[in-house]
Amino acid sequence: MNSIIIPAHVKKIPDLTILCGNKLSEKKCGIPVNIREKIMKLQKLDPYSKASILLMVVAAALVALALVTNLGEFVTAAFVISGALCALTGIFVLTFTRGESSDSRVIGIIFAQECINFCRMLSGLGITGNAFFLPPRITGEPRVRQFNPTRSYSGSQVSAKESFPKTGPAGLVSIPSCELLIQELKTRNALVIPDKEEDLSMLIDETIGEVFDFASRVSASWHDNKVTITFHGHRFIGGCKTIAQESRDYCAMAPCPVCSLCGTLLAEGTDRVVALDQCSINSSSHDVTAIFSILPLPDGNQ
């Protein structure tokens, strides 16, 4: 078997593309395919796995040294105990350390194309209005519905029996993109939606920041009929950037599941029509801010 001679100044095994060039052929670099594959797998391990393997190697070396040398009873016992501790620590780290999760940027752009396609379809139908979240009181349906009007909309009754209502305000009625998340919260977390502002803010923070871990923290501020919600450290901001590059209006026309979840909770909690006015992105801090409007009741009461 051919061997690899590594210069003395090289302290770690370099990437195989450096050793063998761009084409990793056994003929060029002299490394058998099976060994090359094993080295590449080791290079892809996360730091915790590498540390646990190193502890195992150190444990084996300590025990082997104690067995093959005559260091005296106390020194040999110390070596064996140290080896056992290293082995146990390595097993503990390897067992209770979760591997690295999927790339959040990739996950974030999964829903982006669907949002863009939906907005293009709306534009083709002459529908350019932002998304409104209609509580059951407005539609007569048991769940919140999303409504994109063709013209200005003031919060009147909308028929949700069909996607394109034949009577009342014209537009498209659809199921919010967060519907499966709502069902998940109701099934596994016994979701109860409060009706007070402070409780709604707390619920949004808990669901988005803790249950689903979409953001490190969520803050909400209420001012008159405006609700400003900021997702601090949004994990999937990559999808928001992709949609915004296509058009800054698309985020408000076809909200992603995160913004849709906020609008749905606000609509059901306040029992009022909620409109998504705009979304803005702060790339430096990875924050996303969504501004919602709570429409007044038809009789003008707040």
Image (spheres, helix red, strand yellow):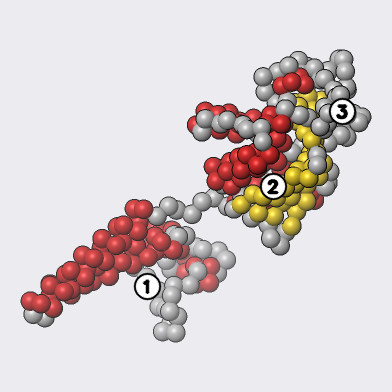
Marks 1, 3: nearer the viewer: 3
Q: Horizontal and vertical percent for residue 96?
A: 36, 53
> Mark 3 = which residue?
300
From mark 3 to mark 2, how far is it between C-alphas? 25 Å
Give residue 3's mark.
1
Marks 3, 2: nearer the viewer: 3
Give the residue furthest to the bottom: 9
Three-letter amino acid code at the position of disc 1: Ser
> Mark 2 = which residue?
220
Do the numbered discs 2 and 1 sit on residues whose CB atoms are within 8 Å?
no
Q: Does label 1 or label 3 sit earlier along the sequence?
A: 1
Taking 3 as reference, is 152 left or right? right
**Residue occupying the point 31% across, 66% down:** 55
Marks 2, 1: nearer the viewer: 2
- Foreground residue, 111 or 23? 111
From mark 2 to mark 1, how far is it between C-alphas? 62 Å
Three-letter amino acid code at the position of disc 2: Ala
Quarter of the figure that contains the C terminus: top right
Is residue 106 in view from this perspective?
no
Label 2: how many residues lie within 10 Å, few (<14), some (14-19) or many (20+)? some
Taking 150 as reference, is 215 left or right? left
**Residue occupying the point 35% across, 58% down:** 93
From mark 1 to mark 3, how far is it between C-alphas? 84 Å
Which type of secondary structure does the marked residue at label 3 adopt? loop
Q: Does label 2 or label 1 sit earlier along the sequence?
A: 1
In the image, residue 205 sits, relative to residue 17, either above or below, namely above
Give the residue furthest to the left: 73
Label 1: how many residues lie within 10 Å, few (<14), some (14-19) or many (20+)? few
Q: Horizontal and vertical percent for residue 296?
A: 83, 31
